Image: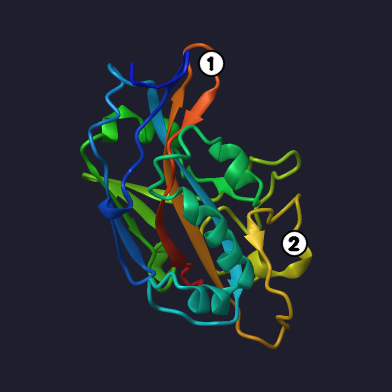
Amino acid sequence: MLSFSCGLDDYPVVYPIPQSNITQTLNQSAVVRIPTDNDPNTTVFSHFVIFYRIYVSKQLVSSSTFDSPTLTAINPVLNSDYNAFFPYIGSTTQVNTNMDSLFGGRKYKTLFLDGPDIDSVLSAAVLGTTLQFNFPDSASGGQLPTMTIGSNVYTLWRSNRNGPSFTSPRPDRNFVNNADLYNSQFIDPAFNADVENLSGITDQDTHYTYAAMYIAAAGIDPTTYSFIYSTPALINIFRLPEPH
């Protein structure tokens, strides 16, 4: 088991995915190269977890630029959240920070898949492989945002958990820029709790939506049986496809 020593205490850790292992292509795709260092025989690694939040915007952005002017133009809260997470990316001092608390405190949810259990999919089986994320421009013809591992293609699903009353993503659990998704009357803890509205946007404005996604390794502390986490890496800030 890997541990860091500090005085008399040993802290089990899991390794992060280096930010340099992630390549973004505009805001439509990303490639995540998974290292092999989280060997479950020598670490407490369990699986990878992906945290996400959807942001409403009236700005069309096609790049994968993460500077403050661009993120603020999309949605000021997106910029604020990114600045809150940035000190943890690649950090060697924020070991074992509780990512559930860090991301949950800013209303982030955990990603699901249509069908398979994502924790099982992102277990030790993905070590040494590549995750490919694709967000098409349009959902026409049934094209939906996906994650591909080898020959397996998984449709991404929005969460219906990570909150006491969050049970009904509207209009559905797909990552698509539907009107009910950004309708302000549905952005509440019971429906679109994974969506951050844009202050000042009106019904006359064109609405776009973007999903910021971060990935971290998770493991189980053998003493407390609680989850521990690596520091996160930013996968991308994806623009959700337009409905067909």
> Residue under circle 1?
225
Point out residue 135 in the picture as x, y percentages from the top left corner: 39, 64
- 3D distance between C-alphas at marks 1 and 2: 37 Å
Badge 1: residue crowd in 10 Å (few <14, some 14–19, many ≥20): few
For the point 33% across and 63% down, the residue is 29
Q: Viewer-proximal residue, 26 or 102?
A: 102
Q: Amino acid at mark 2?
A: Phe
As drawn, the residue found furthest toward the bottom would be 204
Q: Is residue 16 left or right of residue 189?
A: left
Point out residue 44 in the picture as x, y percentages from the top left corner: 38, 21
Mark 1 or 2, which is nearer the eye? 1
Q: Quadrant of residue 78?
A: bottom right
For the point 67% across and 66% down, the residue is 180
Marks 1,2: beta carbons within 8 A: no
Q: Which mark is residue 186?
A: 2
Can residue 176 be seen? no
Question: Mark 1 or mark 2: which comes first in sequence?
Answer: 2
Of the 4 image quadrants, the one containing the N terminus is top left
Q: Is residue 21 left or right of residue 72?
A: left
As drawn, the residue found furthest toward the front would be 7
